[in-house]
Image (cartoon, rainbow, N blue to C red):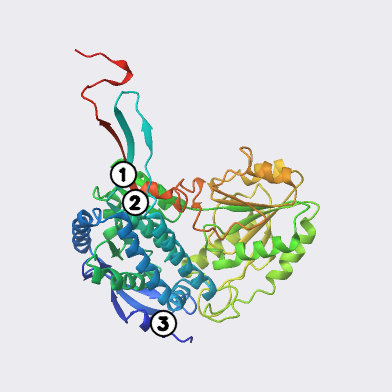
Amino acid sequence: MSNLEFLSELGIDDVNLGGFSTEWYGSGSDLESIAPSNGNKIATIRQCSSGDYEKIMQDTSNIFKKWRMEPAPKRGEVVRLLANEFRKHKIALGKLISWEMGKIQAEGEGEVQEMIDIADYAVGLSRQLYGKTMHSERPNHRMYEQWHPLGTVGIVTAFNFPGAVWAWNAMIAAVCGDVMVWKPSSKTPLTAIAIQKMVNRVLDPLGWNGVMSLLVGSSRDVGEMLIHDRRVPLVSATGSCNMGRKIGEAVARRLGRSLLELGGNNGIIVMPDADPELVLRAVLFGAVGTTGQRCTTTRRLFLHKDVSEEMTKRLVASYSQINIGNPLESDTIMGPLVDGGAVKDFENALDIIKTQGGEILCGGNRIDSPGFFVEPTIVKANLEMEITREETFAPILYLFEFETLEEAISAHNSVDQGLSSSIFTRDMQSVENFLSHAGSDCGIANVNIGTSGAEIGGAFGGEKDTGGGREAGSDSWKIYMRRQTNTLNWSDELPLAQGIKFG
């Protein structure tokens, strides 16, 4: 077994409380965190009950009244200190992410770097929460808009990025003056607890405990309470399309806001003039990285008929050389799926693929060893296969052949999801067609890079069933704040807009 000293560095015990605001809570049922590499228990978590939830929400509401009045650059300074804490424990936290979720250590450490990067970004943002000024039609009047903190933000995260997605939301929301309650995936609770302990080491001496709170618990016990709670004006949720529909509908019924980052069915179009080496590297990282459990995973590959045969041979040969194993071993390229349920989904998908006429070119099997390992799989597919329209959270890559770019774009856009997309070509007309109004219908459209690996400076998110939410960079901060338009009369008169005369 790998050295697990990182658990003690991060303060992970055999039994851990799963809730925190101003103190630790955990009066609910026990939850076991399982290592997907061997199926063994890592530690036990005492989850939050409905009573714990209410205490956390009361603490959160109280601290918001103080935090919102802290000047935004001062809030940015707190976030800067958080970034330093993440830097200090980057390797240990990266290992925990790898051990609890299954992604290789390089990806685990890369995820912590994302946490650091978004915190650094938020520090700068804290001095750039700009509102606009406008000319008034009324003499001696001034108009402007300003942005105010929104309140308590509920953050619901998925297992595949157990730290980064929280940070995308939490660091931005914090400088905006919000407080947050984080409900992590029940598959990766230890990562959340370790992060909360890092947060506490920064916030506690400053008197800001409760700005960032933790809520490990079942959807039944606390998740439902969170999404229906009118004290939570914004719920940011990352997960499946089905989960997003449920949360979006519940929040909408109380006229709250929801920020939804949901499923992807991401495609790459390969034109005849594409650089085959670039394509190969992009597809391998996009389709095999994180064992196919990214929302930006490359799931569909559209190959022009002139290069289809050669690219297919290259891909099959490369897949045969992928080293599968313990994610903490330096030579491992692909780790396990997250749990037994994910393996079952993989196996069920392969059964459906066969019945719908797909040809398995390589892979397609569960690996007979401890843990939840499977073979990365390439399938020669056709557009009539319904399963290719779905997101299977596993390393399954569908290959399609096309003749014209218009044909490829139409097939690419025919699925319900619209997160990430890419084209490989050296032809400017092909590039501009792909990026035009008639091109990719995704929130992310790349040229000569893959579908995975988004940078935090840009807004991250997708269209259609992906939910329409945007996190991280650009002007994504605006969803965490409320806009107010102000009109200031500095005259001795009271003229009305539109020239209305009254009385």
- Crowding around mark 3 (Cα neighbors within 10 Å: few <14, some 14 to 19, many 20+) is some
The residue that appears at 30% across and 40% down in the rendered structure is: 255
Q: Which residue is mark 3?
A: 6
**Residue at x 60% of width, y 60% of height:** 351
Frontmost residue, 313 versus 193: 193
- In-image side of 399 versus 71 (left or right): right
Are the residues flagged by discs 3 and 2 in contact, CB closer than 8 Å? no
Q: Which mark is residue 256?
A: 1
Type of amino acid under label 1:
Gly
Q: Position of residue 80 (x, y in %)?
A: 37, 65
Q: Secondary structure at mark 1?
A: loop
Judging depth in this view, the residue of 107 and 344 nearest the camera is 107
Q: Position of residue 53 (x, y in %)?
A: 23, 61
- Residue identifier under label 2: 235
* Helix, strand or loop at mark 3: helix
Asked if the residue under mark 2 is in contact with the one under mark 1, i.e. CB atoms within 8 Å, the reply is yes
Front-lying residue, 268 or 93: 93
As shown in the figure, which amino acid type bears the numbered disc 3? Phe
